[in-house]
Amino acid sequence: MQTSSPPRSLSPLARRIRAVLWDWDPIGVRAIGAGWPEDEYDDLLLPLMAALAERPSVEELADDLRTVLETDYGLPSPDGCTEAAGALLAVRRED
């Protein structure tokens, strides 16, 4: 999974994925304060939608999240990847 340009309009699934990413907030923008755009994590939407279509396990999706955040965001082993992967898979089951 690699980051990509976000879609121009968001499907219901993309909006639910966005909400999970904001709740998780792996780069900690909420701790910095108000003013961050709601599309802060939208470069992950299309790759996550594609990954979820493959129906990965929690561990596989957590590994993908960890890799993309370490590689594309430069985060050292971000916390919460497993929990976020579980929440994302639950969102997928709702679709």
Image (spheres, rainbow, N blue to C red):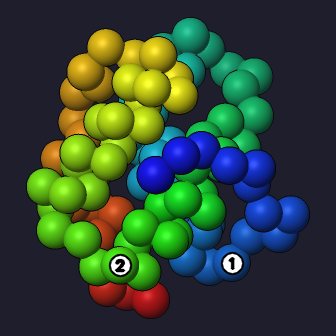
> Which-is-in-front pick, marks 2 and 1?
2
Q: Residues within 10 Å of mark 2 (few under 14, many from 20)?
A: few
| Residue type, label 2 | Glu
Q: Residue at x 62, y 79 (%)?
A: 12
Residue 55 percent across, percent down from the top left: 29, 79
Judged from this view, the residue extending furthest toward the right is: 8
Residue drawn at (34%, 63%) of the image: 88
- Return the residue nearer the eye: 53 or 93: 53
Q: Earlier in the sequence, mark 2 or mark 1?
A: 1
Q: Amino acid at mark 1?
A: Ser
Q: Position of residue 84 (x, y in %)?
A: 28, 49
Instruction: Name the residue tied to disc 1.
Output: 11
Q: Which residue is mark 2?
A: 54
Q: Is residue 16 above or below residue 85?
A: below
Q: Position of residue 94 (x, y in %)?
A: 37, 86
Label 1 secondary element: loop
